[in-house]
Amino acid sequence: MPPVLPMTTEKPQNDLAVTEQQSSQLDAEPRPRPRVRRAHRGVGAMTRYVHRAYSRVLQRRLMPYNLTVAQYLHLRTLWQDGPMTQIEISQRIGIEKASSTSVIDSLEKEGLILRVRDTQDRRKINVSLSPKGEALRDQVRIVARSVADDAVIGIDDDELLLFFKILDKMIANLDAAI
């Protein structure tokens, strides 16, 4: 682990500038990084790490149902919102339509969804749950809930509420930056 450089109010002339004091500290024994500094270090990296860890656990727990996380997200959208077009599913999940195509193909092949061309607009294909896909709802929701529950072990309600408030602010900030 690289050494932690002291915080300074001085702004270096460029990002590559290193003072003599900082240079000697680079040669010194590495010190443990304070926990707060780590969390402050990179919001993007930390949120990506949490997302990957969460996805790994969810994927492992979905294996007995022969589902991937992507398939689960598509099914969950249909369980929550009912039949819709492939484009609508993609928009709600937040992925491109092209990324959704192979997932929907695999769900159809497994008999979990049905695709029917829209009678009013033949360009649209409506996607709905098959009885087999509907039958998975309760079991898979329990699995997904268990991952969410495990993710917050040791975090009290006030901390969790603060976490959600912070995430909401971050999303608003990033939406405003677009």
Image: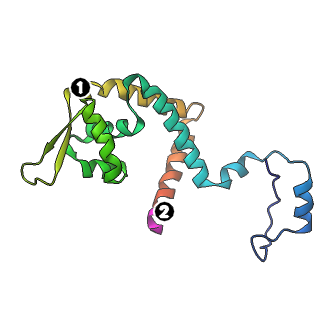
- Does the magenta-highlighted stretch encompass residue 118? no
Q: Is residue 83 left or right of residue 89?
A: left
* Pointer 1 residue: 132
User: For the residue marked with disc 1, what is the amino acid?
Assistant: Lys
* Residue found 46% across the figure and 26% down from its top: 61
Check disc 2 and report its element: helix, strand or loop. helix
Q: Is residue 11 left or right of residue 141?
A: right
The correct choice, above or below, for 67 with respect to 124 in the image is above
Estimate the x, y position of residue 116 in percent, counting from the top left.
14, 42
In this rendered view, identify the residue nearer to me: 65 or 152.
65
Q: Quadrant of the C terminus?
A: bottom left
Please tell me whether the stretch drawn in magenta is mainly helix, strand or loop: helix
Between 63 and 83, the one lying in front of the other is 63
Spatial CA span between label 1 and label 2:
39 Å
Can residue 123 be seen at all in this image of the molecule? yes
Q: Is residue 168 left or right of residue 90?
A: right
Left or right of residue 79, residue 153 in this image: right
Q: Residues within 10 Å of mark 1 (few under 14, many from 20)?
A: few
Which stretch did the figure color magenta?
A: 173-178
Residue that numbered label 2 is attached to: 174
